[in-house]
Image: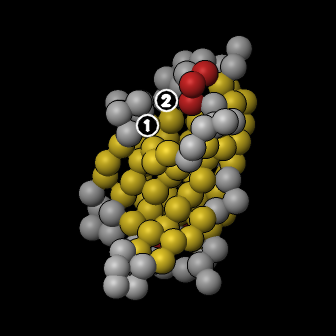
Amino acid sequence: QVQLVESGGGLVQPGGSLRLSCVASESIFSIYAMGWYRQAPGKERELVARVTSVGSTSYADSVKGRFTISRRNAKNTVYLQMDSLKPDDTAVYYCNAHRGPPRQQDYWGQGTQVTVSS
């Protein structure tokens, strides 16, 4: 059972920055795609950014140019650098590890709150 532990959330003013971290309990980046999702109150969980097992990245349109996903394999850690934050970025952010078929598997972290407010 892979465990994912997020950290780095908090309260930040509009225009500010935060960096989220997600530490995996095992070395899985060569097999699993790692992603950051978020869920705001009353809304569905949405994919924010993803890095595949081969290092390709993708982003939701709403965060392109502002957020950057990266990973440090030696530390089993994936990061989400969030710049130019907006109030609409307020949500609980979740780390996800995804493995596709035929041995599909998903693991989730517990989530970290990000609040953007003045």
User: CA separation, marks 1 and 2?
Assistant: 6 Å
Q: Is residue 73 left or right of residue 112?
A: left
Q: Quadrant of the C terminus?
A: top right
Residue drawn at (40%, 85%), measured in percent from left and top?
A: 103
By what rule are the colours in the image chosen? Answer: secondary structure
Instruction: Tell me where residue 30 sits by quadrant.
Output: bottom left
Mark earlier in primary sequence (1, 2): 1
Specify the farthest residue to the top. 118
Element marked by disc 2: loop
Coordinates of residue 91 in the picture (x, y in percent):
64, 37
Taking 73 as reference, is 11 above or below it?
A: above
Which residue position is annotated with label 2? 83
Q: Is residue 47 left or right of residue 19?
A: left
* Kind of residue sitting beneath label 1: Phe
* Kind of residue sitting beneath label 2: Asp
- Graded by Cα atoms within 10 Å as few (under 14), some (14 to 19) or many (20 or more), the crowding at tag 2 reads some
Coordinates of residue 28 in the picture (x, y in percent):
46, 77
Which residue position is annotated with label 1? 67
Q: Is residue 38 left or right of residue 68?
A: right
- Graded by Cα atoms within 10 Å as few (under 14), some (14 to 19) or many (20 or more), the crowding at tag 1 reads many
Residue 9, visible in the rendered structure: no
Q: Quadrant of the N terminus?
A: bottom right
Q: Is residue 109 left or right of residue 105?
A: right
Taking 85 as reference, is 99 above or below it?
A: below
Q: Are marks 1 and 2 in contact (CB under 8 Å)?
A: yes
Taking 98 as reference, is 31 above or below it?
A: below
Coordinates of residue 100 in the picture (x, y in percent):
36, 74
Q: Which mark is residue 40?
A: none
Element marked by disc 1: strand
Taking 107 as reference, is 103 above or below it?
A: below
Coordinates of residue 16 in the picture (x, y in percent):
58, 23
